[in-house]
Amino acid sequence: MSPPPTSVVYLALGGRRTRAARRHVTELADAGARVLLVVADLAEWRTEPDTPGVTLHRLGSTELPQILRAARKFLLTRDGPLAGASLLVAGDPEAMPIADAARRRFPSLSVGCAPAPGPARRPAPADLAVVTPWYPSPNDPFAGAFVRATTDAAGGDVGRVATLHTEGWPYSPKGVSGKLVGVAVERELAHGGGVVVADTPEGELTRVVSPQPSNGDYFLWSREQIARLRAALPTGRIEAPLVHAHTGHYAGAVAAELARDDARIVVTEHATFLDLVFALPASRRQYGDMLHRVNRMLCVGRALYDQVAAQFPEHLEKLRVLPNPIDFDRFAVRPEPPREPLRLLYVGRMVPHKGVLTLLEAFARIAGAEPRATLTLVGSGALELQLRARIAELGLVDRVTQRAPVAPEQVAGLMHEHDVLIHASGVETFGMTIVEAVATGTPVLVARSQGPAETLHGLDGVAGVLFDVTEDPEVIVAGYRRLRAGWSGLGLAQARERLRARYGREAVGAQLREVYREVAQEPPATRPEAGPPEPPEADNRSLIRRLKHGLVTTLPRRGLDYLRARSRKLSSPTPEAWVITAQRAHVVLAGWFDRKVDDPKTSIGADLTPPAESVRAGVSD
């Protein structure tokens, strides 16, 4: 184990990993380190409270090129803050170009993506390996709580457990600065950064940084996760005889690629975005290959089962329905039932498909009729700032509270502080928080999407009220009125026991252990055989067209590929970023040219000048 750092510079130059930064710098300061936190002048940092032992330095910039320029000027001088630092933490992708430059400027400086007691430690072999893109983390303590709950429900019968969390680090590759970030991320991770291994009550936990450029897709992101986890594993393989992956895409694809040939693989599907995965030929094919390799796929709800079965009927015998487990003993029943439905609570991600904007509009109407009503929104996501602005527009600042995500063990306390859990999600595969609310004796007001309709089957009017999936706030208001009218007739104790029998840790854990025993008796599934190569398409273009194609497409591409290879050998990532920018512009130009050449209406002497806006789009993409 490495000695704790005494002087730390922590860079958080973007807006997506602010919670991880706050937690990390607090822990470092509590351990006795002097911490300098360097942030951009973004909205996420404008109300930052003072933290003992942490000095905050704001760069007076909001755009990435200016942020990077200001950070270099502040940090990279010979007598600057890094000169006496023992550790530099690049806490988000936007900080990576500075980390790359600092590594070259200060060779003795330790550089990492997160504080780690043993930076060189790597995952050890295990009896059960859990692979997941979601897991409670410093940046989101609630994400993937169902993964930890499932592992816990399996009990101690499985032996040594290792959790492999491929944590997505999203960033925008727009413009030269965005491409510079991508190059710097790749270089920093190649130095061995981005891997943190720690011991937890559940077993060994490995977090692996997985870059996620916003212009990618599910197939490319999964390939990145495979590459990053492979690089983190000492043998390049998941060293466990049993692998349990959560979500087919990405973790199932990762497990299918990296599991040992003799390993049995179980996948639990939770995803709400399978329609997007199946719409892309490459990711759909990858999903099918994953199903070929796994022994079982467990769907947390019947709607997910039907969706996967419809796409891949040839793998029907591998599919089962097995819900998420809920530890009812951890969700203590509130001391007394709520008297009135006045304190409303939402717990979840602040993203469009969760219906939080519609929920807020509905609450505005409820608040107009009920002056004592309040709403608490707990979670994070892309809509946080939009929600904050709309709350102000509605004049509800004193009645709507926004709170950061909380750790799973704090959820029960939240429920006890409120009267109703309200959810308006249009797509929900299970609805774990809804079951947890009933476990505490808290009534629910939820949309009848796939998961809640199944989990609360037979409990409408008993556990609370379900309303139709909607974007109309009045539908939610009508549901609230119905809940209020039937408040005295709710049967929360009855609902709790019925849900415990269906989804309790003991019931689901027993089914999961039985699945593990079944697959252990089966031979490992095999990877699909590669099909025959497709025959090359006949090129019927004239000699002149082929020459133009070579001059416009083939030769420039090879020249740019050569420059990219040479630029990778340079110490600075900037030349490589410029080459990538040129490659993107060339792809746009060459694609446009090929479409023109292949168009039979285009004559040999036609004007083939590409529109300038297309090339500019390629440069900024």
Image (spheres, helix red, strand yellow):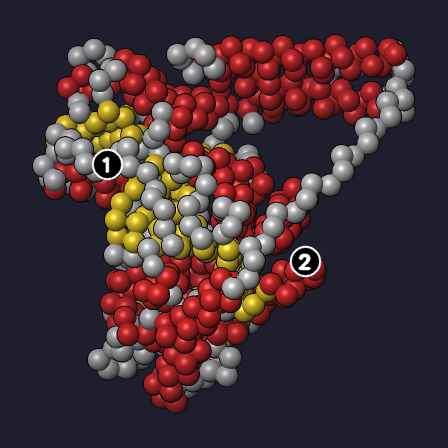
In percent of the image, x 56 and y 27: which residue is there? 621
**SS class, disc 2:** loop
Which residue shows up at 90% across the image and 15% down it? 542
Residue 377: in sight, yes or no?
Answer: no
The residue closer to the viewer here, 264 or 567, is: 264
Q: Amino acid at mark 2?
A: Phe
Q: Position of residue 89 (x, y in %)?
A: 27, 30
**172 or 269, which is in the foreground?**
269
Q: Which residue is mark 1?
A: 118
The residue lying at 63 percent from left, 65 percent from top is 317
Q: Is residue 573 visible?
A: yes
Please tell me whether mark 1 sits on a helix, a strand or a loop. Answer: loop
In the rendered view, would you say 521 is above or below 491? above
- The reply, left or right, for residue 102 in relation to residue 422 is left
Provide the residue designation for mark 2. Answer: 312
Instruction: Name the residue: 41% across, 76% down.
Output: 507
Front in this rendered view, residue 346 or 548: 548
